[in-house]
Image: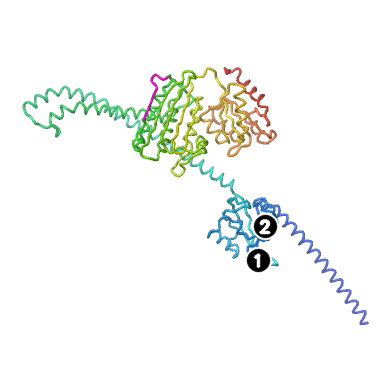
């Protein structure tokens, strides 16, 4: 009887154990499934995730993104301290590590610099945390390379600064025009009254002479007759010259600040443009004590151009030259000349300043490039100058070496015999830009200009105004679709032909571009010869040769 009862109990226990084993197997399966899910999440996370011992900081596990980001093999990561990956072990970073250990950071995101296996450093955004495992307390860090993000933020800040600067310059232009207008009336009154004073003095002079004979040594306004007789004519003449000089400055300020269409060109004297720029820079030159020498070709041919644009270019070169002179014996030489055979006017601005390196010289015409960021430099002066000269189908070049000053040369052709097709090539691939430009010049009468991204293309459209815009679809800062959306709002660009080039002709952006009316789409790789002939064909009926 006892044996039977024991057997029943034993069977019951076996069933309970089997049930527990079943429950345990189910739990293990769930745990295994969850572990696999978290492992997949861990491995496939786009951020670099690193798990390390909270006490020793030795790395115990990493995901694939960490291998890619830091350049180590998996076996090389094992056991190395986490702080070996940190480029800057400053107090702020130590506080982050302490926050990890005492769990104070929550979900706060930190910024720091990290070091790859090859020694290169990068800025990283990371968040951290800790957890308990069977082997003790563990910490983790999820790291993301934010190099590109910081670049974009920096570009946005620069673009905003340029916008503020442009708004300030526009406001300044309005202010200058207003001040010039206010000065104009009183200076005209002075100029009208000076000749009247001169005539009155001449009529009164005999009366003064008679009075001097009757009552010698009488003073008029504290001055003797002898002093007045010897100096008043010259004083009035000096006042007349000073008033005329103010009138000239006011007129030039009004002309310079006047809004005008840079594409409206009239016959103008380059010498006059240079003289006007020198007049506008006079106060800056006096303050800097820089000596300016000029060599103007007399009877230089008239150029069909935009006077204020040439003034602006020369003025900008003058200001840059003054800024480049870092000693007390500064000199600037400005010359104008004419090449009869080439029918080209030359303007040269040379200084004896600090000069520049080859690397700097190659970038000076790029938009937003400046070495005077701390002093409020915008990096737009030479870029705009380059575009203004290009709008005259001219060239501006620079020769410079460190310690040997700089020579800027502007070449302005007279009215060209052939009307050339102006093409702006906007593509972020420098090799393709160069290839298209060279092939177009080889195939026909093309005048080409290039831009490396959408924002630069829009800047150059404001001054170069091409007949054709060749636009890559995918570019940094602004893509082809965004540029198209911007240019359809500008009436002055209505006659410009737009050609889209892309390696993805079926992309949604192409459909959007077609919707707003741009139908000239070419797929990469281009047959450049056919491409050039197609562009020429667009203009055969429009007077281009």
- Residue 242 in the image: above or below residue 87: above
Residue extent of the magenta highlight: 293-300
Residue 244 position in % (x across, y down):
30, 27
Residue 290 position in % (x across, y down):
36, 35
Residue drawn at 87 percent across, 74 percent down: 12
What is the number of the mark on residue 129?
none
Residue 190 position in % (x across, y down):
26, 28
- The secondary structure type at the circle numbered 2 is helix
- Residue 173 visible in rendering: no
In front: 264, or 450? 450
Q: Is residue 468 magenta?
A: no
Residue 453 position in % (x across, y down):
58, 36
What is the number of the mark on residue 137?
1
What is the number of the mark on residue 77?
2
Q: Is residue 294 magenta?
A: yes
Mark 1 and mark 2: span between their CA atoms?
Answer: 19 Å
Quadrant of the image occupied by residue 208: top left
Q: Mark 1 against mark 2, which lies toward the viewer?
A: 2
Residue drawn at 56 percent across, 29 percent down: 449
């Amino acid at each position: 009887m006892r044996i039977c009862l024991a057997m029943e109990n034993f069977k019951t226990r076996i069933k309970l154990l089997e049930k527990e084993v079943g429950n345990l197997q189910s739990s293990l399966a769930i745990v295994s499934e969850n572990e696999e899910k978290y492992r997949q999440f861990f491995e496939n996370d786009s951020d670099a995730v690193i798990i390390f011992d909270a006490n020793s900081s030795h790395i115990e596990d990493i995901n694939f993104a960490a291998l890619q980001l830091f350049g180590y093999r998996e076996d090389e990561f094992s056991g190395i301290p986490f702080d070996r990956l940190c480029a800057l072990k400053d107090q702020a970073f130590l506080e982050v590590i302490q926050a990890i250990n005492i769990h104070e950071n929550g979900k706060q995101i930190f910024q720091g610099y990290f070091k790859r296996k090859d020694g290169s450093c990068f800025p990283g955004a990371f968040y951290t945390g800790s957890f308990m495992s069977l082997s003790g307390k563990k910490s983790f860090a999820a790291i993301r390379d934010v190099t590109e993000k910081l670049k974009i933020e920096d570009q946005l800040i620069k673009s905003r600064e340029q916008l503020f600067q442009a708004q300030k310059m526009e406001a300044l232009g309005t202010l200058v025009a207003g001040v010039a207008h206010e000065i104009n009336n009183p200076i005209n009154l002075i100029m009208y009254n000076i000749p009247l004073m001169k005539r009155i003095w001449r009529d009164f002079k005999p009366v003064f002479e008679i009075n001097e004979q009757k009552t010698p040594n009488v003073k008029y306004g504290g001055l003797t007759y002898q002093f007045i007789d010897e100096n008043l004519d010259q004083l009035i003449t000096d006042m007349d010259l000073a008033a005329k000089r103010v009138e000239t400055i006011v007129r030039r300020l009004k002309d310079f600040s006047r809004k005008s269409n840079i594409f409206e060109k009239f016959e103008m004297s380059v010498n006059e443009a240079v003289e006007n720029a020198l007049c506008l820079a006079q106060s800056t030159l006096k303050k800097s004590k820089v000596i300016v020498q000029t060599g103007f070709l007399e009877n230089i041919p008239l150029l069909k151009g935009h006077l204020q644009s040439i003034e602006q270019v020369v003025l900008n070169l003058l200001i840059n030259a003054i800024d480049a002179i870092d000693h007390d014996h500064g000199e600037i030489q400005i010359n104008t000349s004419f090449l009869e055979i080439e029918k080209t006017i030359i303007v040269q601005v040379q200084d004896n300043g600090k000069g520049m390196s080859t690397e700097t010289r190659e970038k000076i015409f790029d938009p937003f490039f400046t070495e005077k960021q701390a002093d409020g430099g915008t990096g737009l002066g030479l870029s705009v100058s380059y575009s203004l000269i290009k709008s005259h189908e001219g060239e501006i070049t620079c020769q410079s070496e460190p310690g040997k000053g700089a020579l800027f040369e502007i070449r302005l052709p007279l009215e060209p015999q052939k009307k050339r097709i102006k093409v702006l090539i906007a593509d972020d691939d420098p090799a393709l830009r160069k290839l298209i430009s060279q092939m177009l010049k080889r195939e026909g009468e093309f005048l080409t200009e290039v831009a490396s991204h959408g924002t630069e293309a829009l800047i150059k459209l404001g001054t170069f105004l091409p007949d054709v815009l060749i636009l890559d679809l995918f570019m940094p800062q602004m893509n082809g679709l965004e540029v198209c959306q911007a240019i359809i709002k500008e009436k002055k660009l209505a006659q410009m032909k737009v050609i889209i080039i892309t390696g993805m002709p079926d992309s949604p952006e192409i459909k959007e571009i077609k919707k707003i009316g741009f139908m000239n789409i070419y797929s990469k790789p281009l047959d450049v010869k056919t491409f050039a002939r197609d562009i020429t064909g667009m203009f055969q009926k429009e007077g281009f040769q």
